Image (cartoon, rainbow, N blue to C red):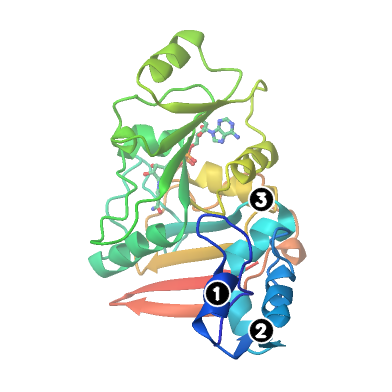
């Protein structure tokens, strides 16, 4: 049996895989490395070996690391894996000066973006994006899972009737600036709110909270302010940058990455393991940081 991760020997969301493997009569198991989850970390391999199964470790390490990147980051850094996704013009804008952003990329690219939503456990957006666009943020693809929708909204300025709250699968992150009356409205509607006492929501603490809630991976979808904050804090593990061959222009048009930025090009965050996909005239460039 070839597996992409050490078979587990504990009861998590599913019963131990090692029991099933032992019962099945499989004689040899090949796995890339031991599971970084401290609950497993070598114990699965031990259990198999004790049962007389030959276990070989190391094959397909590179590929398995890619496959399990979110899971590995979750355990190694004790925070969710953070991907950033945006759809920008050639001049790096994700909306016009009036805030219009529909649509920058073509239908095929947007469909792929919906697929990306389904492979991450949660998506994160800022308050302005919800206020302006009232996005659905679901996967919309048959048979694919909808991610948890997380809205960073210090002042609780979004409407509790926004589309993102169409079911219970949403979470609002508010700060000490959130009016108590608004908090009460959200609570009454049964909307889950994480409240930080500070004026700004500290992303590090937010990611720690998401780790506690066992959110393994998130995709930050914008807008530019929220994406910029994640880059400034160096919390981005992967980028999915869609670009369309259009020019938007305008000093006040929102850029894909706002925040503080950097002073010297030598300090730029450079992607590795680049892959490119073409959707008609649009491109998706993905890479890891
Ligand atoms: N093309 C694309 O891929 C794409 C994707 C998403 C959005 N967009 C466009 O992007 C535009 C919005 O982008 P944006 O940069 O203006 O805004 P944004 O990132 O959507 O939201 C920024 C707002 O979120 C709140 N916020 C963010 N970080 C916070 C923190 N750490 N603590 C407390 N509050 C925090 C603040 O709200 P308050 O100011 O209320 O405190 C802040 O002004 C829209 O026009 C939308 O259409 C484009």
The label on residue 67 is 1
The quadrant in which residue 168 appears is top left
- Numbered circle sitting on residue 119: none
C-alpha span from label 3 to label 1 = 18 Å
Q: Is residue 9 above or below residue 172?
A: below
The quarter in which the C terminus is drawn is bottom right
* Quadrant where the N terminus is found in the figure: bottom right
* Label 3 – label 2 distance at C-alpha: 22 Å
Within the image, what quadrant is residue 204 found in? top right
Pinpoint residue 104: horizontal percent, then vertical percent.
Answer: 32, 58
Q: Earlier in the sequence, mark 3 or mark 1?
A: 1
Residue shown at the point (59%, 91%) measured from the top left: 27
Alpha carbon of mark 2 to alpha carbon of mark 1: how far? 10 Å
Q: Residue 260's spot in the image, x, y percent? A: 67, 45
In front: 175, or 188? 188
- Depth check: 113 or 214 in front? 214
Determine the residue positioned at 62% across, 48% down: 230
> Looking at the picture, how far across and down is residue 169, in whole percent?
38, 39
Are the residues tagged 3 and 2 within 8 Å (C-beta)? Answer: no
Q: Position of residue 15 (x, y in %)?
A: 53, 61
Labelled pair 3, 1 in contact (Cβ < 8 Å): no
The structure residue drawn at horizontal position 63% and vertical position 60%, both measured from the top left corner, is 10
- Ligand 1 has an atom within 8 Å of the beta carbon of the residue at disc 2: no
Question: Would you say 189 lies left or right of 48 here?
Answer: left
The tag on residue 79 is: 3
Count neighbours of disc 1 (C-alpha within 10 A) and say few if under 14, some if 14 to 19, many if 20 or more.
few
Q: Which residue occupies 71% across, 51% down?
A: 78
Query: Which sits earlier in the primary sequence, circle 2 or circle 1?
Result: 2
Callout 2: SS? helix
* Residue on which disc 2 sits: 61
Q: Is residue 53 left or right of residue 264?
A: left
């Amino acid at each position: 049996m070839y597996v992409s991760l050490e078979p587990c020997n504990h009861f998590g969301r599913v019963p131990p895989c090692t029991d099933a493997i032992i019962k099945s009569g499989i004689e040899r198991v090949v796995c890339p490395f031991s599971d970084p989850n401290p609950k497993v970390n070598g114990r699965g391999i031990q259990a198999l070996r004790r049962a007389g199964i030959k276990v070989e470790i190391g094959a397909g390490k590179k590929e398995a690391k890619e496959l399990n990147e979110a899971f590995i980051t979750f355990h190694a850094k004790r925070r969710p894996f953070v991907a950033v996704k945006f759809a920008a013009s050639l001049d790096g804008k994700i909306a016009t000066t009036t805030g219009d952003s529909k649509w920058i990329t073509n239908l095929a690219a947007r469909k792929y973006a919906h697929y990306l939503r389904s492979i991450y456990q949660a998506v994160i957006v800022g308050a302005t994006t919800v206020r302006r666009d009232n996005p659905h943020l679901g996967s919309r693809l048959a048979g694919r899972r909808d991610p948890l929708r997380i809205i960073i909204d210090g002042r609780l300025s979004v409407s509790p009737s926004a589309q993102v709250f169409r079911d219970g699968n949403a979470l609002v992150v508010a700060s000490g600036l959130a009016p108590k009356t608004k908090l009460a409205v959200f609570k009454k509607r049964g909307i889950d709110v994480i409240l930080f006492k500070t004026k700004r929501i500290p992303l590090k603490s937010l990611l720690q909270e998401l780790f506690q809630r066992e959110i393994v991976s998130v995709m930050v979808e914008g807008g530019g302010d929220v994406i910029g904050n994640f880059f400034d804090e160096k919390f981005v593990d992967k980028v999915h940058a869609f670009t369309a061959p259009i020019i938007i222009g305008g000093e006040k048009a929102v850029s894909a990455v706002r925040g503080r930025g950097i002073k010297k090009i030598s300090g730029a965050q450079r992607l590795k393991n680049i892959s490119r996909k073409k959707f008609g005239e649009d491109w998706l460039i993905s890479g890891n940081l």
